[in-house]
Amino acid sequence: MITYEEAFRRVMLYTKDFGTVSVPLMESVNCVLAETIYADRDFPPFNRSTKDGIALQHSAFETNEQVFKIEGIIGAGLAQQKLENPKSCLEIMTGAVVPAYADTIVMYEDIEIKDGYATVHTEPVKGQNIHLQGSDKKEGTVLLEKGIRISPAEIGILASVGKASVVVQKTPTVCVISTGDELVPVSEIPKPHQIRTSNVLSLKAALQKENITATHLHLNDNKEVIQAAVLKALTEYDVLLLSGGVSKGKFDFIPEVMDELGVEKVFHKVLQRPGKPFWFGVHEEYNAMVFSFPGNPVSTFSNYCVYFAPWLKNSMGLGVRDRFVVLKNDVEKHPILTLYIPAVLEWDGATLLAKTVANNGSGDLTSLAEIDGFVCLPPGEANYEKGAQVHFIPSK
Amino acid sequence: MITYEEAFRRVMLYTKDFGTVSVPLMESVNCVLAETIYADRDFPPFNRSTKDGIALQHSAFETNEQVFKIEGIIGAGLAQQKLENPKSCLEIMTGAVVPAYADTIVMYEDIEIKDGYATVHTEPVKGQNIHLQGSDKKEGTVLLEKGIRISPAEIGILASVGKASVVVQKTPTVCVISTGDELVPVSEIPKPHQIRTSNVLSLKAALQKENITATHLHLNDNKEVIQAAVLKALTEYDVLLLSGGVSKGKFDFIPEVMDELGVEKVFHKVLQRPGKPFWFGVHEEYNAMVFSFPGNPVSTFSNYCVYFAPWLKNSMGLGVRDRFVVLKNDVEKHPILTLYIPAVLEWDGATLLAKTVANNGSGDLTSLAEIDGFVCLPPGEANYEKGAQVHFIPSK
């Protein structure tokens, strides 16, 4: 059996680039940008008024002018106008192009308008209230680097440079497979000895948040059925996520089936709780990866968060960083297993605290209610005490 | 003009329940749960083996039995079996129902099987490796409270109690309206004095993350056109989000139009930067709310994050809590305005730090690239220093 650190390291070795795809702008939210975005023109593209008021030539004040004849009005969206007389002015609106020969904007609050003349009550500074062409970014400057997650703020920037479609990282195609004769669909009333499918629906939901629409397959504990279905899935999908069938049971056919189908085992079993029998392998020829999680609900979900989520993030080029939280309560260590304990987060000022959730082991699905993730506690001699800073694995 | 605190308080007074709707389970991810979820049966629903091994009667050890005849095999998904003889055993798989008359499970690792007999090498504890019926939760217990955001973990719980469809909070219908003659669609090449629409696409993307598919309307600076379109939108949508047209400019018709259409002004202008001319109102008869943001990109986006996002959260019943971060750099205060400054977050252990982004004012769209939100700095005498804990408004 290998440690969590070693298992994590090995999974990350199989990080993979799934290529890129061009999608319509509004479908790119939450995707990873796969092209560098340059300013297609200066930002702003012209000398732009930042106030509603009048545009004038500052030199007029040198000859003590205070009253300016209004030549006209310039709204945003109008082509550049011209100040005809250096001693008159043009009314101008926020966002409009500053007219030729004008160099200063005085806002309405600082002037009085009467009978077509504006009287200036202040001493304007030359150049005030003008957002100069190219002062934010020059044409050709990088606005967005490849490899960032596109959030609503970036949508505005992409729109402004005319990206009606955007090149983003492709996500892998995923098939989630549940196994186990005890499982019935959500819409059925289970018999006393049956339970409803739930694990793989959590996985599907988690994948949905990563823009992946996974296919769901349920297989009963029949080796031939499993073999045929897994073979088909290996050829059709980039990733198989399985729940169940990897323990020591008589009907735990997965390791055997994977071996017979030529899926190379990278490891089976990790010194961790929950999720010890986690099986991970790759099929070189079919270019497929297999994450086979133990069937207990907390095992499946924690393994997804601990291994699959960072593997996906890395594969998308986002990079993975360790997160930390401060324990709100004592937690008992395990001498040889890394523990993942469901936890709820709360803020203490700018610091993130984690309170672990009492639970009944890896079968206790209900312990996952309202959690934010898992504290990840390496094995050791001493217990973890309230106030200790520990590694955290988010689940949302 | 009112303060940020007062403006925020007033917006929150208009928090509103938009009712509930039943959606298919997999569409409920990220929605707010609007029904209490009870355990429809005990969790687990039967005495469940947590290991692969043999089920036996512990009393057999009292008479020094070590070797047990194997009566058969019980897989998960089989109805409850019966241990016929208290001195024999049944092989049993993880997830299977513990047979009648058996009370202890010994895992394969602790036994040896030969010729149909299992020899136990350890001294098992009575009741070990059994996940007792109802030990996680009794039938009828609350599993999920109303008013929580449904994440992948909750999807598993909802599935397990048979919620093929889930009652969730309804989100408001939203129309985002851009105004300004200078704006052209994203797919067009703008003339030198024009710019592409971007603000409302950021808003649409932000709404999309809240499960709201907003309608987008662009209106030129023509009072009659604006009046007719706003009237129609007021009757058709719960919320109008506008960008532009609320300043002092000659073509800023929004406040006037709202007044003429009977939208009651709750306030216009807030002591804040960016976004001072923010206009907020309600139309009682049409039951519509109007958030009218100034047209500069940073103004529109920060106002959305500062006011609309918490209003929506509150309306969904989620509750809003202040968030805090530690400044990574000094920031200059403003004597009378609350400042929202674009910022990027990073972790220092379990503590969240914010680095503000150099920017060129509210017109500097490019300053929004890769930000995580805004630090919110109340007006005052002293500047904000590196290391200070300040209020933070997330944008993702």
Image: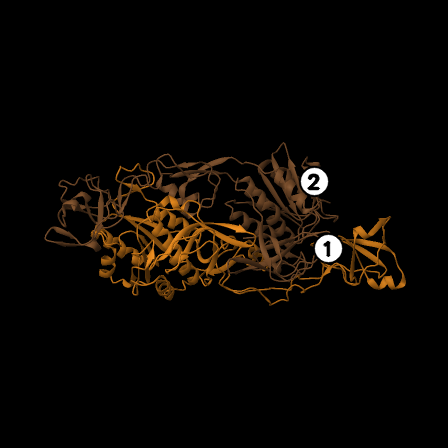
Chain colours: A orange, B brown
Q: Which residue position is annotated with label 1?
A: B381
Residue pictured at 35% horizontal, 57% vertical = A334
Between B389 and A121, which is closer to the camera in this rendering?
Answer: B389
Name which residue type carries label 2.
Val
From the viewer's perspective, is residue B344 above or below residue A298?
below
Q: Chain of mark 2?
A: B
State the mark number for residue B280.
none
Q: Chain of mark 1?
A: B
Q: Earlier in the sequence, mark 1 or mark 2?
A: 2
Name which residue type carries label 1.
Glu
Q: Is residue B169 left or right of residue A76?
A: left
In the picture, residue A83 is in which quadrant? bottom right
Q: Nearer the viewer, mark 1 or mark 2?
A: 1
Q: Which residue position is annotated with label 2?
A: B257
In the picture, residue B112 is in which quadrant? bottom left
Q: Is residue B187 left or right of residue A45?
A: left
- How far across and down, in percent of the image, does residue A297 sit? 34, 48
- How far across and down, in percent of the image, does residue B259 sit? 71, 38
Query: Which class describes the residues within 10 Å of circle 2: few (<14), some (14-19), or many (20+)?
Result: some
Q: Callout 2: helix, strand or loop?
A: helix
Q: Callout 1: helix, strand or loop?
A: loop
Which corner quadrant holds the N terminus of chain A? bottom left
